[in-house]
Amino acid sequence: MTEGEKMYDLCGRLFPICRSITGNGVRETFRIIQAEIPDIPIELHEVPTGTQVFDWTVPKEWNIRDAYIETPDGRKICEFKKNNLNILHYSVPVDATVSLSELREHITTLEDQPDLIPYASSYYKERWGFCMAYNELKSLPEGDYHVYIDSELKDGSLTYGQILIPGKFDEEILFSSYTCHPSMANNECSGPSLITALARYIKDMPERRYTYRLVLAPETIGAITYISRNLDHLKSHVRAAFNLTCVGDDRTYSIVHSRYGDTLADKILTNILKYHDPEYCDYPYTARGSDERQYQAPGVDVPMVCFCRSKYHVYPEYHTSADNMDLISPAGLQGSFDVMKKAIHALEYNRYYKTQTLCEPQLGKRGLVPTMSSKETYKSTLALKDLIAYADGRNDLVDISNIIGAPVDILIPLVDQLMECRLFREVAHD
């Protein structure tokens, strides 16, 4: 089973769960993820309702059991148990009879996508509501409608989790995603599935220079809560950070840059995507929309970029019932995993190197190039020779990759060979 197939299978198990920014759906999501990686502990935290987190307050916990609308002729529509997008998330309970005109005031639709159910929420203002396809709303007859929402808002807690995998040094690489949306495959399930796959991969690495921190929290309020409790540590330890979302389709790859586009994460992911898929989409920070907003906020300044395939707000199925399991694929998820795997290796090897010989080293006697020269052998060994030419202590490995036009994943095994032959040494750099 490929990693992409494992991730797709996990997405399928996460997809039906009704998640929100708090509640039992989030906890069930963590139970499933923990069972997927039983040998990698997830450290879970429950933050009580009313806790002040910077300018925000942790809201009441929301759980829902059932919801539907009953038409004048007794049919049930907008049934929560059939599609949890049918409910306005964080709706207060209601059991009432209303006219069609009053009902319309509580219905969210998409006129430009009339056959799709939108996703909508009201986390910080109490109201009730439903979501349905615009064409369905238009077809409803006049009359009295019974609206029923069996939900609960109470003092409870917000749940977030993190995985910490130690390395040789205490400098950290941070990966984040969120666990707060209901049944949307790309927008919700793909990010936690990729985090899970990366945890498995990082744990099995034979050697790690960096310590890896993987965080799953509700979007926005969860990230704010996490940062409020860990800000000093994040600012002093995190070298590069990646927010992972919408990583399951197979249309494109995308980077949303940090606020000034000048972090190590910007540099690494841009380099990887340039060679992995030259048609990738490059977005500035002004196109942000996920938890990179919180981690990159002024004064927080965690060096984070966002990695997507088709970016949130851009792909047409975003926040609708069309963001289903047919939109994502094992191949799409595998592609995202491969990009992040390359990013991890680039980070681990992104050091400053210097050649150990004066003038050009003889490579043939060390078995690094063929001992018979031809036009073809010259081409096949050019990356090796160019790598050596720019290993003067001024450039890190990604700099050299950008200068000579060779992917980092091509250069890494060459670095290993040159270090083994003692032609390279690592040098400090201010």
Image (cartoon, grey):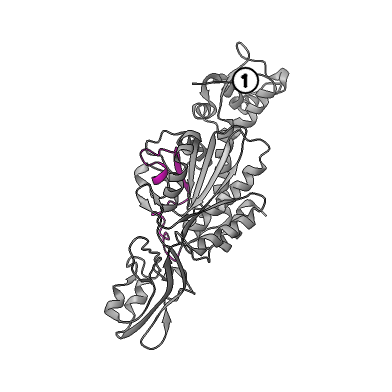
Is 327 placed left or right of 52 in the picture? right
The reply to whether the magenta stretch includes residue 68 is: no
- Residue at position x 42%, y 66% in the image: 154
Q: Is residue 291 positioned above or below 417 on the image? A: below
Q: Is residue 204 above or below residue 81?
A: above
The range drawn in magenta is 293-322
Q: Is 323 above or below relative to 379?
A: below
User: x and y percent of residue 190 in the render?
Assistant: 52, 55
Corner quadrant of residue 171? top right
- Count up the numbered dots: 1
Q: Residue furthest left?
A: 101
Q: Is residue 202 left or right of residue 102?
A: right
Q: x and y percent of residue 148 in the render?
A: 40, 78
**Disc 1 element:** strand
Quadrant of the rendering where the N terminus is positioned = bottom right
Residue 100 seen by the camera: yes
Residue at 36%, 66% (x, y): give it: 113
Task: Name the residue tied to disc 1.
Answer: 425
Q: Nearer the viewer, residue 149 or 413?
A: 149
Q: What residue sits 68% from the left and 19% below the top?
A: 422
Q: Amino acid at mark 1?
A: Arg
Q: Nearer the viewer, residue 209 or 334?
A: 209
Residue 42 position, x and y percent, is 59, 51
**Is residue 309 within the magenta segment?**
yes
Majority secondary structure in the magenta region: loop
Q: Which residue is nearer to you in this view: 149 or 198?
A: 149
Residue at the location (69% across, 24% down)?
Answer: 420
Considering every residue shown, the one lying at the far top of the view is 358
Do we see residue 254 in this rendering?
no
> Where is residue 221 shown, x and y percent of the image?
41, 53
Within 10 Å of disc 1 (Cα), the crowding (few <14, some 14-19, many 20+) is some
Q: Compared to 69, does 194 lie above or below?
A: above
